[in-house]
Amino acid sequence: MSKHELLEKADECATSGRLFEQLATLVAHPTVSGTAEGSIALDSYLGSTLRDRLESLGFTVDLDLNWNGSGNSFLRARRIEHDDLPTVLCYGHADVVDGQDEQWSLGLQPFELTAQGDHWYGRGAADNKGQHLVNLLALEFVLQQRRSLGFNITFLFEAGEEIGSPQLDEYAKAHRASLQADVFIASDGPRQRAEVPTIFLGARGGASFELSVPLRNGGFHSGNWGGVLRNPATTLAAAIGVLVDGDGRIRVPELLPEKLPSSVLQALSRVEVGGDVNDPIIDPSWGDPSLSTAERLYGWNSLEVLALQAANIDEPINAIPGTARANLQLRFVVGTDPQKFESAIRGALDDAGYSMVQLRMGQYFPASRIEPDNPWVQWASTSITDTIGYSPVVLPNIGGSLPNQVFEQTLDLPTLWIPHSYPGCKQHAPDEHALEPVLREGLKMMCGLFYDLGTCMELPSMPTYAKSER
C-alpha cells in the first residue's frame, strides 16, 4: 500500500463515522483529575481502554497507578522493533477538567459526544482525547499496511496534566532509560488557526503572584474619613501600575527577556494572529509597540491582572475598604530568568514607595523550547507539506503552558508538538469541542509523518547514546 492509499484510509475513517464513534467511547469516560470519581475512571481509562489498545498494537505496557503517592498515574508503552532504528517518544494525558455539566448549551452534555455540523462537542474531545486518538489511529493504520512501523516508539500517558502534572518530571527521571528517544512528537494545545497546520516547539512559562494591601479591619465612612485614610484599592491600582502600564507594557526590566533571537524572529515573520470567527478582536495598541502581534504573543512576555477585589462591587457602600488584593500572572519565554521574579517585583514596589503592598508568589511553571532551526523541525515540516500539499506554520512556542520542559530539558529531546485542535475549541470551558476537518487533516498528517519516519525519509542524524538505553 502506498502513502496515498494510507491517506485515503485516514479519510475513510473520518467519513465512515468510525473516528466519531471511537472518540465518543473515550469521551464517555468521566476522567476528571483530582476527584474520587475521576480517579476510578482514570484507572479504567489507563489500565483498560488505553492498555488494551496499545497491547493489540504490539506494545509492552507498564502501568503505575498513583505513582509515589503523587495523585498522578502513568502508563508507559514501548514497541521496539530494532536497536538500530530511530525511536520516537509520544505523550498524551488521559485526564480532563470538571465537566461543568449545568453550563453547557441546550442538548449538549460533557461526557456524551454530540455532533452539530463539523463541531463535535464533549469534554476531552479537544483536550486531549481527540488528539491522542488521532495519533493512535495513525500508528494502527501504518501497522496494518506494513505489519511493522520501521521505527521504535514509546508512549507516555499521564493522569494529572490538568492539575499541574504532579511528579511527571520525577517520573521521567526515574524512567529515563525506557523513555530515551531520538525525537519527541506529541499533540496537545491548539493550532495557530483552525485552517493552519501547526508545529510548535515548546511553551511559555507562567508565574502567578498575589498583591494584597491589608490596611485595616473593615471599612470606614468615606465622608468622615475620606482624604486622610490611605485607600487600599487606590494603592493597589497604583502598585500594579508600577509593574505594568495601562497599555499592557511591562515596566520592570527583570521581568523581560533581553531580546528576541533571530531564529524566533524569522519563524514568526509569517505568522498572523486571530481572524477566525470565534477569535476576539486583537487590540493593536496593547503591549510593546515595537513588536508584531505574533512576536508579542509567542516571542515575548506579558503580565496580566487575572482578578481584582476590594469590598463588594455589586453592592458598594460609602466606605473606604479595609483591604484590597489582586491576582496577577506573568507569561514568559525562554531567556527570562525566573529566579529574579520575586526580588524584582518586591524591589520595584519598594522603590516606588509601596512597601505596604504584600507580595506572595504562587504557582510556577518553566518556559522551554527548542530552536526553530533544529533539523527535526525541518524534517517534520517537509513531511507534513508532502502529505497535505502545503506547509505548516512553525511557532517557537505556544502562548499557553504544557509540561514541555520535562521532555526538552529533563530528557534532552527535540520537542515537536503537532496539535489537532484550534483556538476556539473552548477547552476547559462549557461546550468544549473538536472540529472534524481538523481531526481529519490531523489524522492524515500523522499517517504521513509515521509513514515517512518508517521509511527513514532524510532523517536528522541520530544521537550516539548506548543501544542498551533504548
Image (spheres, grey):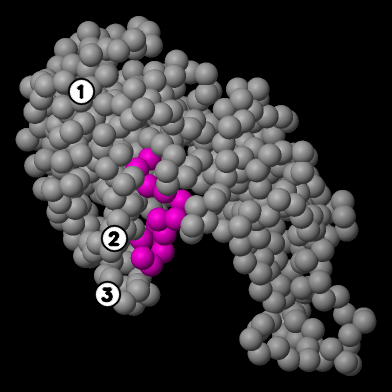
Q: Secondary structure at mark 3?
A: loop
Q: Which quadrant holds residue 326?
A: bottom right
Task: Say which mark, if any, is on residue 3.
Answer: 1
Marks 1 and 3, how far apart at CA: 40 Å
How many numbered discs?
A: 3
Circles 3 and 2, Cβ within 8 Å, touching? The answer is: no
Question: Does the magenta portion include 103?
Answer: no
The amino acid at mark 3 is Gly
Quarter of the figure with the C terminus: top left
Percent across and percent down for residue 279 are 52, 56
Q: Earlier in the sequence, mark 3 or mark 2?
A: 3
The residue at 76%/63% (across/down) is: 357
Q: Tell me which segment is drawn in magenta.
A: 419-432
Q: Mark 1: few, some, or many residues within 10 Å (few <14, many ≥20)?
A: some
Task: Say which mark, if any, is on residue 117.
Answer: 2
According to the picture, the residue beneath numbered tag 3 turns out to be 107
Q: Earlier in the sequence, mark 1 or mark 3?
A: 1
Left or right of residue 366: residue 337: right
The amino acid at mark 2 is Gly
Circles 1 and 2, Cβ within 8 Å, touching? The answer is: no
Q: Is residue 60 above or below residue 241?
A: above
Numbered disc in front, either 3 or 2: 2
Is residue 22 visible from the viewing direction of this image?
no
Circles 1 and 3, Cβ within 8 Å, touching? The answer is: no
Left or right of residue 367: residue 117: left
Is residue 196 visible from the viewing direction of this image?
yes
Q: Is residue 72 above or below residue 33?
A: above
In front of the other: 2 or 162: 2
